[in-house]
Image (cartoon, rainbow, N blue to C red):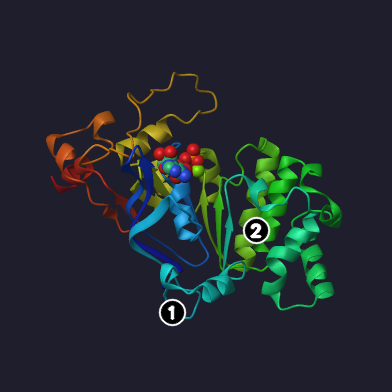
Amino acid sequence: SRPVLSVQGLKAYYRVNAYGTVREIRAVDDISLEIRRNEIYGLAGESSSGKSTLIKTVARAIRPPLQVVAGHVRFDFGTGPRDLYAMPDTELSAIRWRNLSYIMQGSMNVLNPVRKIRHAFMDFAFRHMGLGKADFLRRVREHLAHLHLPPEVLERFPHELSGGMRQRVTIALATVCRPDFVIADEPTTALDVVVQKGVLDMIRNLQRELGSSVLFVTHDMAVHANLADRLGIMYAGRLVEEAPTRALFRTPLHPYTRHLIASLPRIGDDAPRHGLEGRPPSLADPPPGCRFHPRCPLAMPICRQEVPALLAHQPEHRVACHAVAQAAAS
Ligand code: ATP
Ligand code: MG
């Protein structure tokens, strides 16, 4: 079937003016990926690898100094692919919440601290539902109950709720219109493990019931292992590997992904984990060729010169690594 989201050759840079010269921070640098109906796609990678930048761009929630420099973001909500950045504002506001919903990093941002939760539902979701106010609030209460949230939360202020409760309210808000596509940035970070599990179960159940697609970001590989159908691994503004979650954990191919997975704690195993030498590169002045080469145990001369293409190693398993490509060819 056709993908719901198709990202092609996307470049999104922060153009920062510093002492009269423009510095470009190439946080998303030539990314292509597709997300299908009814799947949960997880995006992983260490801090500052560009995860939030990518999903802000995919949600068209960007503001200066962030700019889309090249590429396309296309959504198909059943009426054919539409270019997100070519949409007039009227069309954009028609799809927001109803088709495309975005839960940004730091869930407090969308909840106004001086307004009760009920108002957040009224402000954001009400006009997209085509219901009268009483019917709308009934629907909201049903949705909350479904997510194991008591209706009383509607009468609370954000600060009166726990972090986990607030995060679930944010997810309820983002999903009450039954969107086709949900984008969530670190939806469980900073929550304790039990609450985290509640939020993850909730996202999984919603996706199953609504048949919607979810694009979510976290740097927590354990969360990805539990939730994602497919995973994309970012390193320094690029997608370096993509595979079904199980394949990615079983046979990671990119040296960076192997490091990520090897450094996960395992029960009953106290062996010291190997750290990765060096630091991630500056995105204002990234190394040429493969951005991982200065830290890569497999680096060859070509890695310093040529950007490795993201190639299909298996039909569903793509990796951008010269060493992997050479090994497969020989
Ligand atoms: P984290 O896991 O910490 O949330 P991330 O993978 O989401 O990290 P981004 O927030 O996308 O990373 O940041 C990517 C790069 O863009 C970083 O180098 C960051 O410093 C830079 N960046 C982010 N926001 C801005 C901004 N408003 N202006 C300039 N640079 C920015
Ligand atoms: Mg982030």
Coordinates of residue 119 in the picture (x, y in percent)? 78, 60
Quote the CA–CA distance across marks 1 and 2.
27 Å
**Amino acid type at image mark 2:** Asn
Which mark is on residue 205? 2
Q: Is residue 117 left or right of residue 192?
A: right
Whether residue 142 sits left or right of residue 305 in the image: it is right
Image coords of residue 152 (percent x, y): 86, 54
Quarter of the picture containing the C terminus is top left
**Which quarter of the rendered picture does the N terminus lie within?**
bottom left
Residue found at x 50% / y 22%: 269
Q: Is mark 1 within 8 Å of ligand 1?
A: no
Q: Residues within 10 Å of mark 2 (few under 14, many from 20)?
A: some
Q: Of callouts 1 and 2, which one flags the residue occurring earlier in the amino acid sequence?
A: 1
Q: Which mark is residue 80?
A: 1
Of residues 164 and 21, which is closer to you in this image? 21
Callout 1 amino acid = Gly
How far across and how far down the image is residue 101, in percent? 58, 62
- Kindly identify the residue that appears in the image at 42 percent across and 75 percent down: 81
The residue shown at (27%, 39%) is 291
Identify the disc placed on residue 231: none
SS at mark 1 in the image: loop
Residue 44 in view here: no
Relative to 174, residue 162 above or below = above
